[in-house]
Image (cartoon, rainbow, N blue to C red):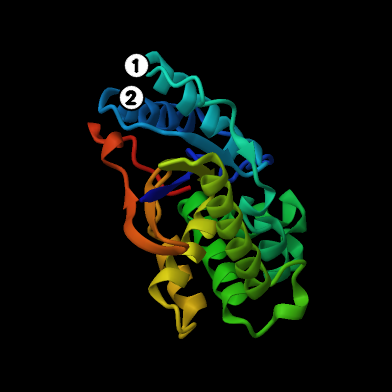
């Protein structure tokens, strides 16, 4: 039986000019996942990543910490890049919600008077996400949610084929919250009923470096677990983040 593990990247740089960069906490989160899998002898046969910096760097920090635990697997090399595992364009989603958000000044003007600007920024982004997921404004976006979901399902098939080609028992993929949510929703809602709503609800709960497990029975993927993140609790809850 083949297991596909999908890890959300470590904490990125939410609210910064370059979001696609791991924060120091994000680097630590990814390394902790590697140490955890190494110390518990969780054998990983292959690693996959999207092409975004935060995804690839999460894989690199994981792999370095994993190998430091004495895991010797000569077949485990640098991650295979599968670009369809990239996240949706969050900037486009935000700007289409309010064109003034195309500039940093526009964003700052919207949050400057809030008691906690970062909280207000998160609230505005949540409203933008609801609009994107609604399906009522699909023509506005560079990639609508339905188009994004179709891409994600293609990525899932690609990693299934890769696992089969490599004869891998366990493949770990570093990707993003929207991707993992779309995969989980499609496995929970195969009839496509309220798929977008389900994906959005899942996405809001996903922890940085939380791992979702999918098992293959033949060619059929089945959801085994969602958002497992016990590796972050050795220092209490201070290492748990959602951004």
When the figure is inspected, residue 206 is found, relative to residue 136, above or below; the finding is above
Q: Position of residue 194 (x, y in %)?
A: 46, 83
Q: Give the camera-side residue of 109 and 182.
A: 182
Residue tagged by mark 1?
A: 69
Q: Position of residue 12 (x, y in %)?
A: 54, 40
Q: Give the camera-side residue of 125 and 157.
A: 157
Residue tagged by mark 2?
A: 38
When the figure is inspected, residue 164 is found, relative to residue 39, above or below; the finding is below
User: In terms of secondary structure, where does tag 1 sit?
Assistant: loop
When the figure is inspected, residue 99 is found, relative to residue 12, above or below; the finding is below
Q: Position of residue 70 (x, y in %)?
A: 35, 14
Residue 175 makes an appearance in the image: no
| Cα separation between marks 2 and 1 | 5 Å
User: In terms of secondary structure, where does tag 2 sit?
Assistant: helix
Q: Give the camera-side residue of 233 and 51.
A: 51
Q: Give the camera-side residue of 93 and 210.
A: 210
Q: Residue at x 51, y 43 (%)?
A: 173
């Amino acid at each position: 039986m083949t297991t596909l593990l999908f890890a959300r990247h470590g904490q990125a740089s939410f609210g910064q000019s370059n979001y696609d960069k791991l924060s120091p906490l994000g680097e630590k989160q990814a390394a902790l996942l590697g140490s955890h899998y190494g110390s518990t002898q969780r054998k990983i046969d292959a690693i996959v990543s999207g092409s975004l910096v935060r995804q690839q760097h999460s894989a690199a920090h994981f792999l370095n910490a994993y190998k430091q635990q004495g895991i010797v697997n000569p077949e485990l090399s640098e991650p295979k890049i599968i670009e369809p595992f990239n996240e949706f364009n969050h900037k486009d989603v935000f700007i289409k919600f309010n064109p003034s958000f195309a500039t940093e000044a526009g964003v700052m003007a919207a949050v400057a008077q809030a008691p906690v600007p970062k909280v207000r920024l998160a609230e505005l982004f949540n409203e933008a996400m609801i609009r994107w997921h609604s399906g009522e404004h699909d023509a506005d976006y560079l990639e609508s949610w339905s188009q994004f979901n179709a891409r994600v399902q293609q990525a899932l098939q690609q990693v299934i084929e890769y696992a089969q080609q490599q004869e891998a028992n366990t493949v770990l993929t570093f990707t993003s919250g929207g991707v993992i949510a779309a995969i989980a929703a499609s496995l929970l809602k195969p009839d496509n009923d309220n798929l977008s709503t389900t994906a959005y609800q899942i996405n809001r709960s996903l922890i940085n470096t939380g791992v979702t497990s999918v098992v293959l029975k033949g060619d059929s993927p089945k959801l085994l677990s969602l958002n497992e993140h016990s590796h972050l609790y050795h220092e209490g809850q201070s290492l748990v983040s959602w951004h």
